[in-house]
Amino acid sequence: MTDHAPGVPHRVSKGERTRARILASATELFARSGFHAVSLRDIAAHAGLTHAGLLHHFPGKEALLLDVLSLRDETDARLLFPGMLGPGVPEPEPEPEERLRRLVEVVARNAETPGLVALYAKLSAEASDPDHPAHAYFVKRYRLLRRELTDLVRLLFARADPEPSGDPAAVAQQWLALMDGLQTQWLLEPDAVDMAEQVRTFLRRQGLRPDREEAGPVSG
């Protein structure tokens, strides 16, 4: 049963607004100081809540961290890789060329959200420690991204004429490494690094065409 009638805009509840404010505060503070240096009391104060008020919505800091990390990933997955969301997801999977273009758009969009870029850069480094609460999350995230990007590159290579000779799995790993490295450089000196253009250059060198006007894979 749905909570509201079909076709009627969903009215955001006070609880939903409060959760969104908590997530925004946690994102900002985790990005600025890392997971371990931030307390729930810090987040509650930043969000304008009491400690008890925050605990009403999130049982602990680890649960809050995972919600912060998952929020953007779910949005990107719906746009890029509906298959990552599991069965029952109504979104049709876009064509490989469209997925490639959207991936580059996500890189360009990240340049408008420095807080989230800083969050992922800082926490992915922290989470290399097996005892970090986000360790399993990042291991799973990179495993899924390698798989999905490898499948995407394989599809695009197969549609190109002539077919590029590169190894799709190697290209996928290099692609991820490039994006991570570019994010760090961009955070240090934003005006010196055009993340989206560097990703486009890399993809073209692999025999791919990441812009709509370039019509997907290279053809002979």
Image: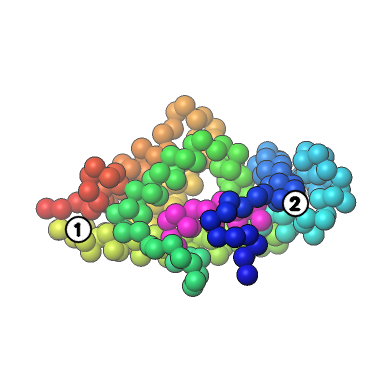
> Against 106, is 138 above or below?
below
Crowd band around label 2 with a 10 angstrom C-alpha radius: few (<14), some (14–19), many (20+): few
Residue 118: image quadrant is top right
Measured as percent of width and height from the top left, residue 67 is found at 66, 56
Image point 78% across, 44% down: which residue?
Answer: 43
Mark 2–mark 1 Cα distance, whole angstroms, equals: 50 Å
The residue that mark 1 highlights is 160
The residue that mark 2 highlights is 15
Image point 29% across, 44% down: which residue?
Answer: 211
Rendered-image quadrant of the N terminus: bottom right
Q: Main secondary structure of the magenta part?
A: helix
Q: Is residue 79 magenta?
A: yes
24 relative position to 169: left or right? right
In this view, the residue farthest toward the left is 220
> Against 174, is 185 above or below?
above
Question: Of 24 and 146, which appears nearest the observer?
Answer: 24
Res 152 seen here:
yes
Image point 58% across, 43% down: which residue?
Answer: 116
Mark 2 or 1: in front is 2
